[in-house]
Image: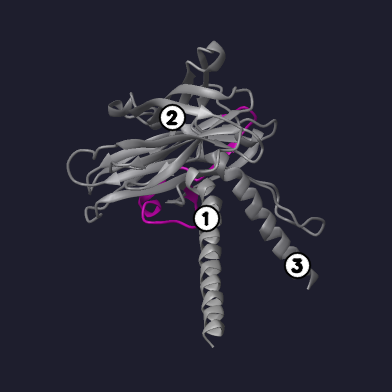
Amino acid sequence: MPDQLSRRARASLLMLIFAACAPIAAHAGATTADPPAPGGRIGIGVAEIPASRLDDPRARVYIDDHVNPGTTFTRALKVFNFSAKTRNITLHAGGAAIRNHRFTFAPPPAGNELTSWIRLNRTKLDLHPGGSALVRATIAVPAWASEGERYAVIWARVASPKPGPGTNIALVNLVGVRAYLHVGPGGEPATDFEIGQVHPRLGADGDYRVVATVTNTGHRAIDVQGRLYLLEGPDRLKEAGPYPIARGTTLAPGEEAEVTVPLGRGVPDGRWKYRLTVQSGRVSRTATGTLTLSRRPAAPHRALALLPLLVTGLGCAALTLIAAIAHRRVRERVSGHQAG
């Protein structure tokens, strides 16, 4: 029984570590000599960008492509060791999907259709402190592949020694590069989206947020990012911001979701003009308008305010009618007695 409990505890801890590392890995995409170090241990990033996508910000951090069925292509990735000791790093392709407006990762070693098309020229690396190495991912799309978009992650993984008699914990550090691959005949389908309603929201913590509805009207998944400016505010304030959109929202084609811009508590109440710019890859859209920030509760609706008066009036009318009927009956009885 204790051994079963320890195994369960170990499995739960590993899943927690995986969940904590995965969001960091989702944004790993270092292409500079000194990229950020997710987890302070290892990193992985895109090492080459196709000539046709040099102007695409997303291609700098992800494998983001459209190909025809039967196409084979290669992308180079670079793996880094930021730690002060030699690391034994393993690499593999893992499955991914878009669920609940998030790019989600399947726990290793789960795969999907796209991962079955990916081959890495190196699956193990021994990197000295400060070292780096190139890894090439070859993606062979079969001629029979159906039209549509697939998702995956190419992971770099380093783990502490396996649990032994003296410990039940094995630490795992995962970082990865996302892959968005659209397969279909002809040219790449359009990426597009729309900004819908924009309105302020006061959180339970007392901080303002501006919430905007974004709808993916194109045929490729979008990763929503951007910024908000507040303009011509109260007390002659000319501008506030920019405030970045909270990251993490990914929309598949046809999906709609709210994105949030945290403002904090430093923004004064009053009427503001806004300019909200939303971007995904090469595509950018801007919405403008006005919004009012107010911590005062909204006044009750007029129809609700009239409701007590309406009820009172009906009550009085009913009492008057009852009184009139009673008075008539009394008169009839008096008249009957007099006639007798």
Q: CA distance from mark 1 to mark 2?
A: 78 Å
The mark nearer the N terminus, 1 or 2, is 2
Find residue 202 and report its image quarter.
top right
State left or right for residue 219 relative to residue 154: left
State left or right for residue 181 relative to residue 332: left
Q: Mark 1 or mark 2: which is in front? A: 1
Q: Which residues are magenta?
A: 103-131
Residue sitting at x 74%, y 70%: 4
- Is residue 169 placed above or below 298 in the rendered structure? below
Q: Position of residue 8 (x, y in %)?
A: 70, 64
Q: The disc labelled 3 sits on which kind of residue?
A: Leu
Q: Residues within 10 Å of mark 3 (few under 14, many from 20)?
A: few
Residue tagged 1: 313
Residue sitting at x 49%, y 49%: 104
Q: Residues within 10 Å of mark 1 (few under 14, many from 20)?
A: few
Residue tagged 3: 5
Q: CA distance from mark 3 to mark 2?
A: 44 Å
224 or 171: nearer the viewer: 224
Does the stretch in magenta take in 191?
no
Q: The disc labelled 2 sits on which kind of residue?
A: Ala
Q: Which mark is residue 47?
A: 2
Q: Mark 3 or mark 2: which is in front? A: 3
Q: Position of residue 340 (x, y in %)?
A: 54, 88
266 or 40: nearer the viewer: 266
Q: Are marks 3 and 1 in contact (CB under 8 Å)?
A: no
Q: Position of residue 72 (x, y in %)?
A: 28, 43
Q: CA distance from mark 3 to mark 1?
A: 70 Å
Residue sitting at x 67%, y 60%: 11
The mark nearer the N terminus, 3 or 1, is 3
